[in-house]
Image (cartoon, rainbow, N blue to C red):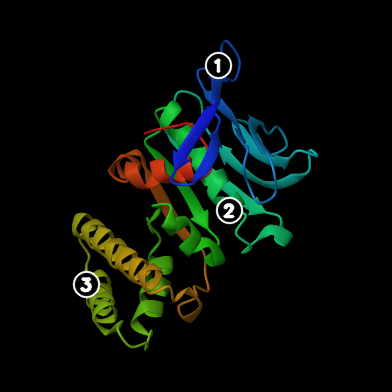
């Protein structure tokens, strides 16, 4: 532990404790403290979540009174290089009030990914959380034709000023997908479609206009190790912001 200084402010840092779940288990789990938060000192621990099923873990975020403020449930199969996110939650009284509990939980899962050499973290985001996950570099990974049709339609029907070009891209790729019978080419079109959806989301985030562009359905999304490394400075600044002594 030491102090990280930025100008007149100082943030007390704590190094995450990373260890194997059991001596015979290859998977590593993380625990850490956040000393300086609006809600006071916080503790995060990852443990097995037997209620959710085999290979499931849960990250619990608690305050100094042992009250659970938020949690994330995820699945890490043994000897595999992927994670399946099941559910992330922050207690309602702390949402949108600059406690950043969701952000801290996400940073903990990124440490978990890196320490376990995970290549990708797959989730099905709730419609209300798509922009949240996108902020932390999750990208659309829609595979269902039905879901892709819905998301492309929502972009095509977005009549807000400044979104005409993206709407046109969505319309063109939608037409290509509908008329394609070649499986390999169709897969390429889906990749292109996911790129258009990502472009749309990034523009909404840049414009800070999430309320004007709500999603009404859930979305498959993926965070890759490659994307974490590509954006390592972004994540390293967030670790410093919360007093977590960890660097990518």
Q: Is residue 247 above or below residue 133?
A: above
Element at badge 2? loop
- Residue at (73% x, 61% y) in the render: 93
Which quarter shows the N terminus? top right
Q: Residues within 10 Å of mark 2 (few under 14, many from 20)?
A: some
Q: Is residue 80 visible?
A: no
Within 10 Å of disc 3 (Cα), the crowding (few <14, some 14-19, many 20+) is some
Label 1 Cα neighbours within 10 Å, binned few <14 / some 14-19 / many ≥20: few
Mark in the foreground, 3 or 2 = 2
Q: How far across and how far down the image is residue 98, in percent? A: 60, 59
Side of 36 where 201 appears, left or right: left
Q: What residue is at 62 percent from the left and 42 percent from the top?
A: 36
Task: Give the answer, above or below, for where 149 lies relative to 246.
Answer: below
Where on the picture, by quarter, is residue 146? bottom left
Say which quadrant the C terminus sits in: top left
> Looking at the rendered structure, which numbered label has been put on residue 176?
3
The answer to whether any part of residue 201 appears in the image is yes
At horizontal 68% and vertical 40% (from top left) the residue drawn is 41
Q: Can you identify the residue that label 1 sits on?
A: 25
């Amino acid at each position: 532990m030491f102090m990280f200084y930025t100008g007149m402010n100082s943030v007390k840092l704590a190094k995450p404790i990373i260890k194997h779940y059991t001596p015979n288990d290859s998977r590593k789990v993380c625990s850490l403290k956040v000393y300086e938060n609006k809600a006071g000192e916080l503790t995060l621990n990852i443990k097995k979540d037997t209620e959710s099923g085999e290979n499931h873990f849960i990250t619990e975020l608690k305050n100094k009174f042992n009250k659970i403020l938020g949690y994330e449930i995820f699945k890490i199969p043994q000897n595999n290089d992927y994670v399946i996110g099941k559910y992330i939650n922050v207690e309602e009284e702390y949402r949108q009030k600059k406690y950043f509990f969701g952000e801290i939980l996400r940073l903990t899962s990124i440490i978990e990914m890196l320490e376990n050499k995970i290549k990708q973290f797959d989730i099905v985001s709730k419609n209300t959380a798509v922009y949240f996950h996108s902020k932390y570099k999750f990208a659309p990974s829609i595979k269902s034709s039905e879901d892709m049709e819905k998301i492309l339609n929502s972009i095509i029907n977005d009549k807000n000023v400044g979104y005409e070009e993206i709407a046109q891209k969505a319309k063109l790729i939608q037409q290509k997908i509908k008329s394609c019978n070649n499986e390999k080419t169709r897969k390429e079109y889906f990749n292109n479609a996911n790129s258009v959806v990502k472009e749309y989301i990034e523009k909404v985030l840049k414009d800070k206009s999430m309320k004007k562009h709500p999603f009404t359905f859930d979305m498959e999304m993926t965070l890759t190790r490659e994307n974490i490394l590509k954006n390592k400075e972004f994540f390293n600044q967030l670790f410093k912001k919360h007093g977590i002594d960890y660097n990518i």
